Image (tube, rainbow, N blue to C red):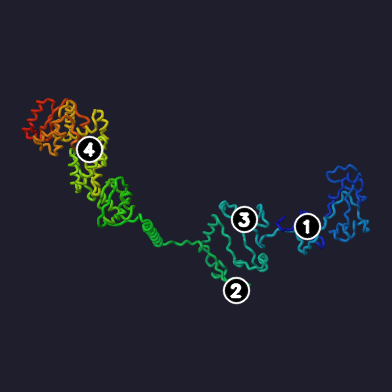
């Protein structure tokens, strides 16, 4: 079969056609009608008397009497059961009833009767057409097929060839597609009489590819040879259109025009790059401005600002906390610029808590610089030296801060609000630790005193005051009181342990301490201002007339004096006396040596009175 819808052909040639219906008449095939001997029982087949039947292939002849093929009935040529003489026709019955005695009886080996009438019998006969054998024709008349068919076969000659030249190994197959467009050709039949666009234009010859094709193009040059006309009739060839009676100009196709590359001007390229760079810069700057508009946290003032405003930096504030404080006071426009400036400056971690004098509407960098300037910090730095009493300490704070001393006295009158340790028994004396303090303008007096007591508790905890006092058999308050006397009796750290040893030896032996500083504390005088009458005054702080320690500390001892009270020197020292203007003392356990040293002090005018 050559394709779908094609006519059938057999190896024996075309079938003979019958008249009328266009169906082929049945062929006689002897082999189909040979009857085996075991069927006829050795009798001669009907209709073949006097003839000997040939044995079928592969059948062993067992009897001499062999039947032959049955005679072909005449009614087989009727082709249809509608024929009036057909034995199956209803008008004739079975044939015998109609007086048809010439019909042979039915034989078991007889061929099957024709198929009963059906749809195919009612089909009209096909009109008389060419009865030539079915042959394969090209897809387009006048041109071979250019592609292989199914299974690699083609229905016509293929106009393609391959070169055996090794240099043409990469050449593609050259295929001819030229249709016939002349008068009376089958091209119009294929299109049904329709006009085919471009059918009158002759296509260029196929171009060869590969190395041979490139050499042929180089030999031919870039364009057509001089004097040639690619279109056949000049640059503007005219093709006559018989349908409309017009001459259509046809411009030949030049492949070079479609592939020509435009040469770029360097100046134009440079200008394009500059324009592109400008667009990028504009996008970046515009994006920054847009972010500032959308995100107000990115706004920033410029310059050093104007006016004056005070802000407080709390203890533990982070850079973001400080930035928010500055933003609320309108010192900076937003937090981000200040934080960015502070993160780039390592000194920013040194911003101390306190009150600062700032300006309004400063840039983030300017605000940071001002916070790092000590002159902008609004505070009173108060230094409390060792050995001052509570009264003198309050006066010093009031003097340094410029605030009324009555405010601090009122705060000192409520020791329970100051955080005193339990062993202080509600006494503030001796527990305002000597150190340097920064007092802010808006710090409350009670907060200032509470800070000083907190500093004492921190030092006492570090030197383990309570534990070591218990190991000595003393109370913490007794140790603080001894330390306050040591602080008042000497200015040299190397003598503090010896003074402490003298005090403890006298306490252990029941000898009055004889320290005039305790009496001076009670009388609110300096030790050099005491008179003979003052020395005879009887009171709990007169250690000349009373044995034991005074009821309270007499000053605020420093850490060195506290340490000396916890770790005195060794020996049986009982006396000491001033022997130089630098404050050094002479220590002894012998009373006679003490009297001699005391005379030397008086002679030197050092204030060693009777």
Going from N to C along the chain, the mark reached first, 1 or 4, is 1
Going from N to C along the chain, the mark reached first, 2 or 3, is 3
Find the distance from the CA under tag 2 to the CA under tag 3.
40 Å
Q: Which mark is residue 427?
A: 4
Going from N to C along the chain, the mark reached first, 3 or 4, is 3
Left or right: 538, with 479 as reference point? left
Q: Report the front residue among 41 and 252.
A: 41
Q: Is residue 595 above or below residue 455?
A: above
Front label number (3 vs 1): 1
**Taking the image as drawn, is residue 277 in sight?**
no
Measured as percent of width and height from the top left, residue 214 is found at 53, 57
Left or right: 114, with 338 as reference point? right
The residue that disc 1 covers is 14
* Circles 3, 4 touching at the beta carbon (< 8 Å): no
Q: Is residue 177 above or below residue 34?
A: below
Q: Which mark is residue 246?
A: 2
Going from N to C along the chain, the mark reached first, 1 or 2, is 1
Measured as percent of width and height from the top left, residue 119 is found at 79, 59
Find the distance from the CA under tag 4 to the CA under tag 2.
130 Å
Find the distance from the CA under tag 1 to the CA under tag 4.
142 Å
Quarter of the view holding residue 530:
top left
Name the residue: 35% across, 55% down. 298
* Circles 1, 4 touching at the beta carbon (< 8 Å): no
Measured as percent of width and height from the top left, residue 538 is found at 13, 33
Element under label 4?
loop
Q: Report the front residue among 223 and 276.
A: 276
Going from N to C along the chain, the mark reached first, 3 or 1, is 1
Find the distance from the CA under tag 3 to the CA under tag 4.
124 Å
Front label number (4 vs 2): 4
Element under label 1?
loop
- How many other residues sit within 10 Å of disc 1, few (<14), some (14-19) or many (≥20)? some
The residue that disc 3 covers is 161
């Amino acid at each position: 079969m050559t394709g779908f819808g094609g006519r059938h052909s057999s190896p024996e040639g075309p079938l003979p056609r019958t008249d009328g219906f266009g169906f082929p008449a049945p062929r006689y095939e002897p082999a189909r009608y040979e009857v085996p001997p075991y069927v006829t029982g050795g009798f001669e087949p009907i209709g073949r008397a006097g003839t000997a039947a040939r044995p079928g292939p592969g059948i062993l002849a067992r009897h001499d009497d062999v039947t032959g093929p049955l005679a072909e009935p005449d009614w087989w040529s009727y082709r249809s059961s509608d024929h009036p003489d057909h034995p199956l026709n209803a008008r004739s019955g079975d044939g015998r009833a109609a007086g048809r005695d010439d019909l042979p009886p039915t034989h078991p080996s007889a061929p099957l009767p024709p198929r009963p009438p059906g749809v195919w019998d009612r089909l009209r006969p096909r009109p008389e057409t060419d009865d030539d054998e079915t042959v394969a024709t090209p897809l387009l008349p006048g041109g071979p097929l250019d592609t292989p068919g199914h299974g690699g076969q083609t229905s016509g000659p293929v106009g393609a060839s391959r070169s055996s030249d090794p240099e043409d190994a990469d050449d593609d197959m050259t295929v001819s597609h030229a249709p016939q467009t002349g008068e009376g050709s089958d091209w119009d039949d294929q299109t049904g009489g329709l006009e085919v666009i471009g059918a009158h234009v002759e296509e260029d010859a196929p171009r060869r590819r590969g190395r041979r094709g490139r050499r042929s193009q180089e030999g031919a040059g870039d364009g057509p040879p001089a004097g040639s006309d690619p279109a056949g009739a000049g640059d503007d060839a005219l093709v006559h259109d018989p349908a409309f009676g017009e001459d259509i100009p046809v411009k030949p196709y030049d492949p070079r025009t479609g592939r020509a590359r435009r040469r770029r001007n360097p100046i134009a390229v440079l200008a394009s790059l500059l324009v592109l760079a400008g667009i990028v810069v504009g996008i970046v700057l515009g994006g920054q401005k847009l972010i500032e508009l959308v995100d107000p946290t990115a706004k920033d003032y410029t310059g050093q600002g104007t006016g004056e405003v005070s802000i407080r930096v709390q203890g533990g504030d982070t850079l973001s906390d400080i930035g928010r404080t500055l933003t609320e006071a309108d010192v900076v426009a937003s937090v981000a610029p200040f934080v960015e400036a502070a993160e780039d400056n390592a000194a920013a971690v040194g911003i101390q808590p306190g009150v600062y004098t700032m300006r309004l509407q400063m840039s983030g960098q300017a605000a940071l610089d001002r916070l790092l300037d000590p002159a902008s910090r609004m505070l009173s730095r108060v230094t409390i030296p060792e050995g001052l009493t509570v009264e003198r300490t309050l006066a010093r704070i009031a003097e340094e801060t410029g605030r009324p001393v009555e405010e601090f006295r009122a705060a000192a009158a409520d020791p329970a609000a100051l955080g005193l340790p339990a062993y202080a028994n509600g006494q503030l004396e001796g527990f305002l630790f000597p150190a340097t303090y920064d007092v802010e303008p808006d710090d409350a007096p009670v907060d200032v005193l509470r800070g000083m007591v907190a500093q004492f508790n921190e030092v006492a905890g570090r030197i383990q005051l309570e534990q070591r006092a218990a190991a000595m058999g003393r109370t913490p308050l007794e140790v603080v009181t001894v330390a306050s006397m040591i602080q008042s009796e000497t200015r040299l750290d190397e003598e503090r342990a010896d003074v402490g040893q003298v005090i403890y030896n006298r306490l252990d032996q029941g000898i009055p301490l004889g320290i005039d500083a305790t009496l001076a504390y009670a009388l609110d005088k300096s030790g050099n201002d005491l008179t003979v009458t003052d020395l005879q005054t009887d009171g709990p702080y007169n250690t000349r007339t009373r044995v034991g320690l005074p009821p309270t500390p007499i000053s605020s001892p420093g850490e060195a004096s506290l340490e000396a009270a916890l770790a005195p020197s060794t020996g049986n020292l009982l006396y000491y006396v001033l022997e130089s203007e630098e404050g050094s003392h002479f220590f002894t356990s012998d009373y006679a040596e003490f009297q001699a040293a005391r005379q030397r002090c008086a002679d030197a005018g050092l204030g060693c009175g009777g």
